[in-house]
């Protein structure tokens, strides 16, 4: 498993096939399309996005799903929404399965099916991606970069289609971008050699491909969430491989936590999915980028104080001491998944302790101003909902 790509030049990686062109442009987004194409519906955010699109539009939703056949894909997607408590039987007729793969040319569809799909769909939500904090850019390129290129190819065929691309705030986690006084939505993330980590790099290149397509006439919006965690009311979280969740779990199992100078920003999945769908329905959103973060983030040490208030017995250690304890425990319990994850995580280019400038979300707030949507703060109430869910699924006890 390689962690770093030594000769990688992200700027030269961001080349959009010259045959992908956009003959007509859309200046105003259609709030109620008849057909939508969604990728990544079988994932965490994707499940909530699918439910929100089904609620907020009357569209038929074509979902790209990896599977051996349509029946397995349909069952997998339905079970996925059932697991999140989202499924409604009447949605069955509005969900149309497209068996395919982002990492393959034409999404693994035949040319005829690809053209037919391009003819049918009016708008694309490209949310699918291969998420792994430890894989190299080369490993993630097929799904995240070339997959985005295939989505843009689809958008360019037949009638004009808007593309809603789910990126990540992590595209700004290079030293150069982090030096700015504030990261605003119209800033372009800078990819120099200091943007580390294959996942971030692949999202940066994919975002850049979308910008190249915009210059060729595509109407596209870019959404950049920070870390997405559980639903703000139910705590349901499909992102249990997340570094923060594993860090909290390891701390609780060890009975200690490292004193870190880090600020934790996270957004509940319902805020992200509802905001994306609402923003995508505003005619004036076309061409804009939206930063989706929590205006009330929290210091790591304060988060741990709240965790203690919720009944967990924890002692603070300095970071080095805590790492030594983690390594000792890892030797004693070499199969403990949280310990394994963290020992890899702290050795990989992670952004947890990077100092980040304030983020700005003027376009997002403007786009949401006529909606009831707001991001709940990271406070004791949200944490207690999250810990209740962790306990419900026995996450904190699992070795
Ligand atoms: N989670 C976060 O904290 C976070 C933060 C910022 C941005 N984002 C972005 O939000 C989006 C959704 O993230 P998530 O957390 O929901 O991820 P996730 O739970 O891992 O879901 C990823 C989805 O992409 C699909 N996918 C992956 N490779 C594919 C391929 N080759 N072909 C077709 N589908 C493929 C997966 O399908 P399978 O079910 O078949 O694996 C799954 O449906 C991503 O674009 C991510 O970069 C996430």
Image (cartoon, grey):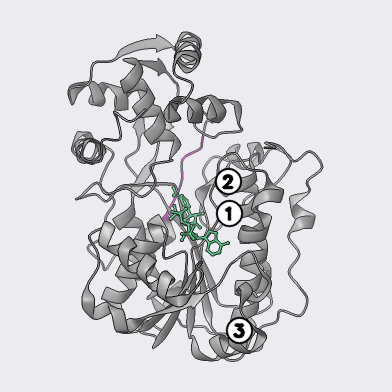
Query: What residue does disc 3 label?
Result: 114
Q: Quadrant of the N terminus?
A: top right
The residue at the point 52 percent across, 31 percent down is 355
Tag 1–tag 2 contact (CB < 8 Å): yes
Q: Nearer the viewer, residue 256 or 95?
A: 95
Quadrant of residue 100 within the rendered picture: bottom right
Residue appearing at x 45%, y 13% in the figure: 332
Task: Quote the CA–CA distance across marks 3 and 2.
Answer: 33 Å
Point out residue 176 in the picture as x, y percentages from the top left corner.
66, 40
Stretch in magenta:
356-361
Q: Is residue 214 visible?
A: no
Q: Residues within 10 Å of mark 2 (few under 14, many from 20)?
A: many
Q: Nearer the viewer, mark 1 or mark 2?
A: 2
Left or right? Give the position of 226 relative to 201: left
Image position of 336 (left or right of 145): left
Q: Tell which tag, 3 or 2, sits nearer the viewer.
A: 3
Q: Which mark is residue 172?
A: 2
Question: Residue 187 has which mark?
Answer: 1
Mark 2 secondary-structure assignment: helix
Location of residue 255 in the rendering, given as x and y in whole percent from the top left corner:
31, 15
């Amino acid at each position: 498993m390689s962690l770093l790509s030594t000769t990688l030049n992200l700027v030269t990686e961001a080349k959009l096939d010259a045959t992908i062109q956009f003959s007509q442009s859309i200046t105003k987004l259609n709030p109620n399309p008849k057909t939508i194409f969604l990728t990544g519906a079988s994932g965490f955010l994707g499940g909530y996005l699918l439910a929100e699109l089904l609620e907020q539009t009357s569209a038929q939703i074509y979902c790209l799903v990896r599977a051996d056949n349509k029946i397995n894909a349909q069952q997998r997607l339905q079970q996925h929404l059932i697991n999140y408590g989202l499924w409604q039987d009447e949605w069955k007729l509005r969900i149309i399965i497209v068996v395919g793969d982002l990492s393959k040319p034409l999404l693994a569809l035949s040319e005829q099916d690809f053209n037919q799909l391009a003819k049918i769909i009016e708008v694309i939500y490209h949310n699918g991606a291969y998420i792994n904090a430890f894989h190299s850019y080369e490993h993630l390129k097929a799904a995240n970069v070339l997959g985005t290129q295939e989505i843009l190819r689809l958008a360019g065929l037949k009638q004009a289609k808007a593309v809603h691309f789910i990126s990540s705030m992590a595209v700004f986690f290079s030293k150069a971008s982090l030096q700015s006084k504030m990261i605003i939505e119209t800033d372009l993330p800078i990819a120099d050699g200091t943007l580390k980590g294959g996942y971030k790099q692949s999202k940066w290149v994919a975002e850049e491909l979308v910008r190249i397509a915009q210059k060729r006439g595509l109407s596209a919006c870019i959404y950049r969430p920070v870390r997405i965690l559980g639903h703000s009311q139910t705590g349901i979280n499909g992102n249990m491989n997340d570094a923060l969740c594993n860090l909290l779990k390891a701390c609780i199992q060890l009975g200690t936590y490292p004193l870190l100078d880090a600020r934790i920003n996270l957004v509940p999945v319902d805020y992200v999915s509802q905001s994306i769908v609402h923003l995508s329905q505003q005619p004036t959103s076309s061409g804009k980028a939206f930063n989706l973060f929590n205006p009330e983030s929290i210091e790591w040490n304060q988060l741990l104080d709240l965790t203690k208030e919720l009944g967990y017995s924890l002692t603070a250690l300095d970071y080095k001491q805590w790492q030594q304890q983690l390594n000792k425990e890892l030797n004693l319990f070499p199969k403990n998944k949280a310990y394994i994850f963290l020992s890899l995580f702290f050795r990989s280019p992670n952004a947890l302790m990077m100092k980040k400038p304030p983020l700005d979300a003027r376009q997002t707030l403007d786009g949401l101003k006529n909606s009831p949507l707001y991001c709940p703060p990271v406070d004791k109430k949200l944490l207690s909902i999250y810990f209740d869910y962790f306990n419900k699924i026995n996450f904190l006890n699992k070795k």
